[in-house]
Amino acid sequence: MSEEFTNNKGIKFEPNVSKAVIDTAIDGIIVIDAGGRIQMINPSITNLFGYDEEELIGEKINMLMPNPDRERHDQYIKNYRETGERKIIGIGREVVAQKKDGTTFPILLAISEANFGGQKYFAGILHDLSELKEIRKELKQSEMRMLHLSENLPVGAVYRIEDQLYLNRKIQQIIGYSDEEINSLQAWFKALMGTHWEEYYEMYLQDRLRNFDQVRTYRVNTKSGGIRWVDFAGYRDGKGEVWILHDVTQKVNIESELITLNEQLEKRVKEKTLALKENVIALEEANKKLVKREEELEQSLSMERELNELKSRFVSTASHEFRTPLSSILSSVELIEMYSKEEQEEKRNKHINRIRKSVKTLTDILNDFLSLGKIEEGKVTPTIAEVNFNESIESLKEEIQHLGTSDQKVIFRLNKVDIRMLTDKKILHTILTNLLGNALKYSEEDVYCEVVKGDDHTAIKIIDRGIGIPKKDQKHLFSKFFRAENAEAIEGTGLGLSIVKKYIDILNGEISFESKEGEGTKFKLTIPDSHEENSHY
Ligand code: ADP
């Protein structure tokens, strides 16, 4: 008959249930007293240790331990009782147990302490670890097999189990260190990566997190102080990993040699290019000089040609223009000789006047040549002063009267009674004589000269109803010696207008014309009042 128990929640249960649980537990259970004597065991204990129950009850617990624990166990309990310092109680630990036949086996031992009826008892639960140990051993063996395999690999291999490193022969050859010298992760990085090893270590840890998804090339310092380059590839497996290390020093060296060679080549090419460039520049310089010389030569040649042309044009114009007045002078002189009588004075005077007129024509032509020469040499400087235009008209009329026919007149139209200009009087005079002279010479009717004085300039128009200027000749009108086609029968040198143009420029003025062949010509001038005393051309 079994007694009934009530638990703290008021539920009744059979006390034999506890016993049944203890009896059938896989783990061994032992209860000892304060003196270390076995008080109770469950059947698992007899199975584990090979003793019968009778052989154990009342015996000392240390009979189940191998040395040194066996001898020291009494001391252990004593220590605990005196100091209360727990080494195993309530903690649980892996220890070694000994069977009846003397063989030992690993157990996980958990001890609890209990007081009952004023007595201290200790209860131990033992879990057999033999099988687990066996598995671990097998694992270790497979690791070792793996190491052994990698030992003879033709590439460097490092096997890492937790912090422990195992180096194969090849990697030891590469780095010159033995696996005793480098047996931990830190030792590896410290020995091989130089002063910055911590950065490489950090990088390795990062790579490890990413399951070594890329191959890295490391520069490693060998034990003998040399340098090697290795390609590093890692493979993870649980707590361990394998590194495969390829010595690529030769490849890297060849590459860097190639780079150096390439750089040298590039440098030489650059130097050569530079030298070439300098040569090209020098050549270009020389060429430029040559071209310039050529141009100068060409220029002086064309100047010479132009001069020659001018000379010949001058000679032909001069001989043509000089012939008429000279022959007229000659014939007049001959006639004067014939009119030697006193009553022939009138006839003599007529010829003397003809001579005078011819000489004047010759002088005019020569003056034209001279003034053009002077202007072209830049020797003409205007003398600015107030010019009374009304006074100028008189001398102009006198100057040009012989150029037209006796019934031709110049009709002046002025917008003011008294026009005063600030310009060079002589130059203005030459310009107007030329233009008015032409207007008379190339027409048979009266000529108009309109003068409009503005605030700071004078606008002058010279209008005739003469032969006009053919369209095709108009663009050449201001060139030296140029004469229009329809003017050939009329005396002239082709110098007047080119002189006018140059003088207008000296006065900072403008000149233009409109003309129609057979209808007439209109020249327009604008001459500014110059406020500079002496403006230089
Ligand atoms: P020149 O009168 O001595 O020939 P210019 O240089 O004064 O030389 O004139 C150049 C040419 O311009 C003249 O030969 C003539 O063909 C043309 N020309 C100038 N003025 C007039 C004008 N008022 N009417 C028609 N033709 C003119």
Image (cartoon, rainbow, N blue to C red):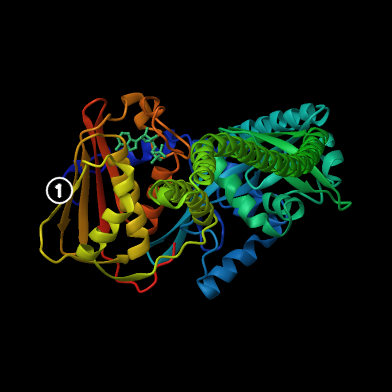
x, y percent for residue 340: 50, 48
At 30% across and 67% down in the image, what residue appears? Answer: 530
Q: Nearer the viewer, residue 6 or 313?
A: 313
Residue located beneath label 1 in the image: 10
Q: Nearer the viewer, residue 254 or 384?
A: 384
Q: Nearer the viewer, residue 451 or 269?
A: 451
At 70% across and 32% down in the image, what residue appears? Answer: 143
Image quarter for ligand 1: top left
x, y percent for residue 363: 49, 51
Q: Is residue 65 above or below residue 137?
A: below
Viewport quadrant of the N terminus: top left
At 72% across and 39% down in the image, what residue appears? Answer: 287
Count numbered badges in the picture: 1
x, y percent for residue 268: 80, 40
Task: Find numbered disc 1 in the image and state the secondary structure of the residue it sits on.
Answer: loop
Q: Is residue 69 left or right of residue 177?
A: left
Residue 350 visible in the current orientation: yes
Residue 100 visible in the current orientation: no
For label 1, the crowd category at 10 Å Cα-Cα, with few meaning under 14, some 14 to 19 and many 20 or more, is: few
Q: Is residue 96 left or right of residue 286?
A: left
x, y percent for residue 477: 38, 36
Viewport quadrant of the C terminus: bottom left
